[in-house]
Image (tube, grey):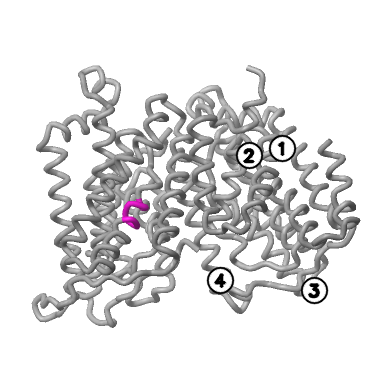
Amino acid sequence: MGFDRLVAAEGDGGSVVQFLVQGISTGMIYALIGIGFVLVYRCVGLFNFAHTESYMLGALATFTVATAWGLPYWLAILVAATFTTVVGIASEFVAFRRLILARSPQVNLIIASIALATILRALALLVWGPDAQPVKGYEAMVSLGSVAVSGQHALIALAALCSIVLVYWLLYGTRLGVALRAVADNRVVAGLLGVDVRVTLPFAFGLAGLLGGIAGALVAPIFFPQFRMGQAVLVKAFAAGVIGGLESVPGAIAGGLLIGVIESIAGGYVSSAYKDLLAFALLMVVLVVRPGGIFGGRQSEKV
Amino acid sequence: MALALIAVGPWAARAIGWRVGYLVQVYSLVPIWITACLSLTVVTGYVGQVSVGQSALMGIGAYTSALLCRSGLPVTFAVICAIAASVVGALVLGLPTLRLRGPYFVVTSLAFNGIFYELVTNWISVTGGPSGVSNVPSYGGFVGGYVPWFFAATLTLGVWALGETRLGKSMMAVRDDEMAANAIGLRVVPIKSLAFVFSGMIAGLAGVLMVHLVGFISPDFFTVDQSLLVLTMVLLGGVRRVEGAVLGAILMVLVQEAFRRFAEVQLLFYGLTMLVVILFFPRGIISLFERR
């Protein structure tokens, strides 16, 4: 289990442009999730394994609002994003705060996040059941020059871009964002200068949850949402982060796009059966050859 | 007390004659889980790398042994090959982590487990696909029940002894502070590699014991959830000591049997157990009995 191929609405073969558009839109999704990883990783040195579960919860919440309640898709995106933001903040409070403030070893934080991921996945299984659920998105085709591409893919790319702009504004244009970046640079000094970690940490987790939820809501019409989809995307989003160096937001975006495009083109021209293997192979190669990421410096020891 | 139970157990189950096969099965699964837990004690408890791919290592051993046996090779040869295959698997898994710390091993082990599952499910011509491999020679019967216990006991002693040696202490030094360990002249890469070798060996043996006990395997024995179960067991008992592995495995098997009817909540139970343990007593139940 864990790696069920949930790719349902692949385009019916076709041109390089279609594969590129699909690759970029999927890559933007990996990028959104990757940014969430990077934000939390920079702040507390925790790679939050529960983070992709917010993507899963966002997608399933979209199903509930859009399909089960029959409300419009855009409203479903808003509800899903709000929901996962709350889950993010709550998870920091329940699972991590105690460990972070006690400066527990990193291993303990990792285990807590694995536990939280398992709990969220199990709860989703209890609430939504094991089956993949359908969501109706934006179905029209959009013409791009002479080629028609799926409107949902275009919408994903556009909405993800807007979310990334929103993240940059939050990080660079608000007081809370400045505080967050200060904590990421040096938690001790930031604390001495009066930044309250009990405010910035929920902010980081909430923002990560928000991005995960948006990503989930956006892919819901393409991948039928199911309780395992968070675990399935984890390796790819992580690979995206590693390629960028796990410490930089632009790196995560570039890594996500790279993985998305490679995957889409390889899936289109070689075989979609080996898509998951591809991300894993890429991850292993980058880790062995350039552990600091393609864009990072030569930083082989991350102790 | 425990020894007496182990000695009398299979005989008692037979004497009562009540759901014999089933009880014997559950009872002899305990040492297999203990063995699986010990493989995590080495890699997580001693060297500090959290693995969520342990069941894939078990699976490599189990499938190798089962397939070689079925093709008519002698069992001893099959078992040796199986353990060697698991060691190779563990080394591949550990390769990127030799120079890195932190989340990397968790993700590679997760991906490793996922790919192993996909592979054995889809490579139908060799592995039999989702229906698995059946008619594997098993060591059942009266004496058979003791075979896994023998190995579990030997390995428990072995892993405990490893923790007492210079090598074991070096592993713990790497776990506690890799930079400091390096600075005092410990060679971190060989130490970590050895830990992966031991862990792969033990996990492979657990898989071998399992397949030759049950006589049948399918991909569903080796999911990520099974790896999470092993991790939960070790954490519950106490990840840094062999007693923890033994205690955790026994407790979780008992709990699982008690709640067998509520399969849907099992995953939730694993997660909650892990979270409570890591938040409130990160060294496991065994630490409650330690003198301060």
* Badge 4 and badge 1 both on one subunit: yes
Dot 3: what SS? loop
Q: Position of residue A178 (x, y in %)?
A: 16, 32
Report the span colored magenta: A52-57
**Alpha carbon of mark 2 to alpha carbon of mark 3: how far?**
35 Å
Q: Which residue is mark 3?
A: B72
Q: Which residue is mark 4?
A: B121
Quadrant of the image containing the C terminus of chain A:
top left
Q: Which residue is mark 2?
A: B41
* Badge 2 and badge 4 both on one subunit: yes
* N-terminal-most mark, 1 or 3: 3
* Badge 1 and badge 2 both on one subunit: yes
* Residue A69 falls left or right of residue A114: left
For disc 3, the chain is B
Q: Is residue B95 visible?
A: yes
**Labels 4 & 1 near each other (Cβ < 8 A):** no
Dot 1: what SS? helix
Q: Residue at x 69, y 61 (%)?
A: B62
For disc 4, the chain is B
Q: Which residue is mark 1?
A: B159
Please, what is the dominant secondary structure of the magenta stretch? helix
For disc 1, the chain is B
**Alpha carbon of mark 2 to alpha carbon of mark 4: how far?**
29 Å
* N-terminal-most mark, 4 or 1: 4
Dot 2: what SS? helix
Is A20 placed above or below A254 here?
A: below
Q: Residues within 10 Å of mark 4 (few under 14, many from 20)?
A: some
* N-terminal-most mark, 1 or 2: 2
Of B143 and A277, nearer the camera is B143
* Badge 1 and badge 3 both on one subunit: yes
